[in-house]
């Protein structure tokens, strides 16, 4: 029994150390979850329902024909159900910097017989998104992976239509976790306003709106 406790404690300690190092390194350069760990990203967290795909999508009030940006889409955990919600007249633009993640998301889209998702290998802040195109945006446990958060959020702000909503989800289990205050501080700098908040301090979804008038 003592040996088991020691092994478990050691593994937890190593995990925490890796998380701290990863978080500190992410302040200097983008360090997303590697593609070989995509199976972990695909799973809904069993400890908090805030981060579950159907919960995040349910808060967005997606309608047929809407245009949605899934920024840092990973293996398509949100892109697939979002595409089903907006229907064939709508469209999801799913972006990620890792080809391995995009490949997995494309496989899932094909398996679900969805052809209303456009996959792009680009990063936020590169200036490659259209202006005033999207009704909704998704940013799920991604913001902390981006060193220049202000530039990234400004690009999403410009990409949304006036009145468009960006859904930001953060959970404490993620090594890049961002507090609500941190997100609001950067978001307000680029023009976003808070519209809604779901969850609690350690696991939440924050809706940010691009105002219809400035």
Image: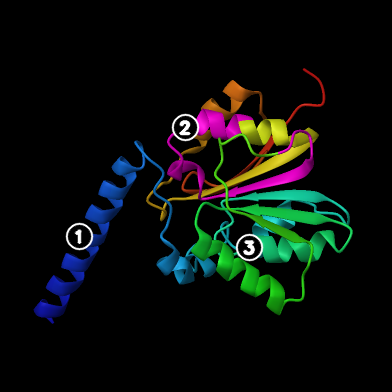
Magenta run includes residue 195: no
Report the residue marked by disc 3. 53
Q: Residues within 10 Å of mark 1 (few under 14, many from 20)?
A: few
Lateral position of residue 207 relative to residue 96, left or right: right
Q: Is residue 143 magenta?
A: yes
User: Residue 14 falls in which quadrant of the image?
Assistant: bottom left
Q: Nearer the viewer, mark 2 or mark 3?
A: 2
Position of residue 79 in the picture relative to residue 124 (left or right): right
- Describe the element under mark 2 as helix, strand or loop: loop
Q: Which residue is mark 2?
A: 148
To which residue does mark 1 refer? 13
Q: Is residue 72 above or below residue 214?
A: below
Along the viewing direction, whichever of 63 and 194 lies nearer the viewer: 63
| Magenta region, residue range | 130-154
- Residue 157 is situated, as x and y percent measured from the top left of the image, at 68, 32
Where in the figure is residue 36, as x and y percent of width and height?
Answer: 41, 68
């Amino acid at each position: 029994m003592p040996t088991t406790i020691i092994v478990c404690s050691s593994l937890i300690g190593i995990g925490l150390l890796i998380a701290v190092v990863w978080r500190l390194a992410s302040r200097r350069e983008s360090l997303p979850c590697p593609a070989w760990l995509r199976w972990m990203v695909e799973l809904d967290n069993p400890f908090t329902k805030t981060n579950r795909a159907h919960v995040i999508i349910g808060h967005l009030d997606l309608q047929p024909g809407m245009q949605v940006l899934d920024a840092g889409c990973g293996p398509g955990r949100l892109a697939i159900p979002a595409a089903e919600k907006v229907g064939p007249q709508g469209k999801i633009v799913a972006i990620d910097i890792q080809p391995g993640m995009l490949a997995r998301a494309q496989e899932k889209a094909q398996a679900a017989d969805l052809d209303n998702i456009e996959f792009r290998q680009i990063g936020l802040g590169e200036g490659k998104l259209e202006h005033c195109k999207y009704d909704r945006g998704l940013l799920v446990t991604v913001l902390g992976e981006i060193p220049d958060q202000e530039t990234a959020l400004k690009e999403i702000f410009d990409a949304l239509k006036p009145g468009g909503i960006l859904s930001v989800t953060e959970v404490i289990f993620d090594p890049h976790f961002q507090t609500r205050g941190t997100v609001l501080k950067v978001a307000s700098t680029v023009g976003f306003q808070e519209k809604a908040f779901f969850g609690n301090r350690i696991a939440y979804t924050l809706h940010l709106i691009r105002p219809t008038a400035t």
